[in-house]
Image (cartoon, rainbow, N blue to C red):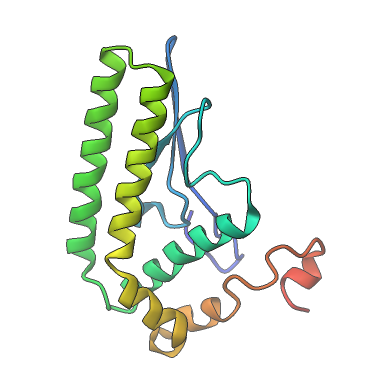
Amino acid sequence: MHKTALGDHTTSSMILVANKKQKTIWLTGCSTPCLALYKPVYFTDPWPPVYTDSQESLAYWLKREYLVRAIYAGLIDVASYRGKIRLLQEQFVREEKELLAREGSNKEMALFSEKCSRLEEELIDSYQEEIEKVRENPEILPKMWRKYTSSLGKNVFARDLQDRIGK
């Protein structure tokens, strides 16, 4: 879900594919599904974007948020980026289909999930310079995104809404 004036930005998008033999949760781990790669996660042995440590989870999400903002700032060519995620997404879907067709074991599914997570991380890391530019200098963003970015990652663990929004 994209951010609106109501502030309803999501932290991830999810697709659940369930059949008699296997359930796959495809997660983005970032807020903007049109600029995200869905990774397979299985109940047996989850890999990122699933975390048990809240700080690791936040760091993972923030990295992708800064990437999206770098795209909005024009630091990354959106067509080229989308082409890369499309190719990876097609690869993930194709490989999972092959794995399911031969009834891969839970261990194989976990290894596949890990591989997809790693490949997505490598893609994100290839934009580290642009991510850091936005993180260090939000003034390069379009005006609307400067305001949103000023509170990005702040007070996210606050229990009270007023504390979370800084009022």
Q: Residue at left 50%, top 35%?
A: 46
Q: Quadrant of residue 80?
A: bottom left
Q: Is residue 37 above or below residue 96?
A: below
Pick out the residue farthest to the top: 20
Q: Quadrant of residue 107?
A: top left
Q: Is residue 16 above or below residue 102?
A: below
Q: Residue at left 61%, top 65%?
A: 6
Q: Quadrant of residue 115?
A: top left
Image quadrant for the C terminus?
Answer: bottom right
Where residue 89 sits in the image (x, y, percent)?
Answer: 26, 42
Q: Residue at left 50%, top 59%?
A: 61
Q: Looking at the image, which is closer to me, 65 or 102?
A: 102
- From the viewer's perspective, tell me whether residue 35 is left or right of residue 143: left
Q: Looking at the image, which is closer to me, 123 or 4?
A: 123
Where residue 156 sits in the image (x, y, percent)?
Answer: 68, 65
How many circles with numbers are drawn on the protein?
A: 0
- From the viewer's perspective, tell me whether residue 158 is left or right of residue 37: right
Q: Looking at the image, which is closer to me, 39 or 17?
A: 39
Q: Is residue 85 above or below residue 156?
A: above
Q: Residue at left 27%, top 36%?
A: 92
Where residue 141 sits in the image (x, y, percent)?
Answer: 40, 83
